Image: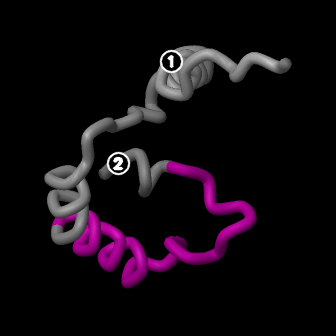
Amino acid sequence: MAVVLDRARDTNLFGKTTEERERIMADTTGIEPLLRSSTTIEIDTRKSLTEVVDQLATLAGPPPSHR
């Protein structure tokens, strides 16, 4: 949950106030387990950009061949 709260809020004003941050924490606690229980793949964006892109490329598979 710290990742969500630590992300910069330069272009998105939501999450700057104490009340909004508490809502983020409550929503994460209540909703995240539901999302995780129904997923088959999780991409951890705390990893380096290279690792995330490599994971996405692996999931996407090879590019289609052009005929």
Q: Residues within 10 Å of mark 1 (few under 14, many from 20)?
A: few
* On screen, residue 51 above or below 32: above
The colour scheme used to paint the residues is one colour
For the residues carrying marks 1 and 2, which lies nearer the camera in this image?
A: 1
Q: Which residue is mark 1?
A: 58
For this rendering, which residue is in front, 14 or 32? Answer: 32
Mark 1: amino acid: Thr
| Position of residue 8 measured from the top left corner of the image (x, y, whole percent) | 61, 53
Q: Is residue 48 in view from this perspective?
A: no
In space, the residues marked 1 and 2 are separated at their CA atoms by 27 Å
Q: Residue at x 42, y 80 (%)?
A: 20
Residue 21 lies left or right of residue 49; in this view the side is left
* On screen, residue 42 above or below 5: above
SS of the residue under disc 1: helix
| Position of residue 25 measured from the top left corner of the image (x, y, whole percent) | 28, 67
Check if mark 1's residue and mark 2's residue have beta carbons within 8 Å: no
Q: Residues within 10 Å of mark 2 (few under 14, many from 20)?
A: few
Query: Which residue occupies the extreme bottom position in the image?
Result: 19
| Position of residue 1 measured from the top left corner of the image (x, y, whole percent) | 30, 51
Q: Residue at x 23, y 68 (%)?
A: 31
* On screen, residue 3 above or below 29: above
In magenta, the rendered stretch is 7-29
* On screen, residue 39 above or below 29: above
Q: Is residue 58 in view from this perspective?
A: yes
Sequence-wise, which precedes: disc 1 or disc 2? 2
For this rendering, which residue is in front, 36 or 63? Answer: 63
Q: Residue at x 41, y 46 (%)?
A: 3
Q: Which residue is mark 2?
A: 2
SS of the residue under disc 2: helix
Residue 24, magenta (yes or no)? yes
Look at the image and tell me in which quarter the C terminus lies.
top right
Mark 2: amino acid: Ala
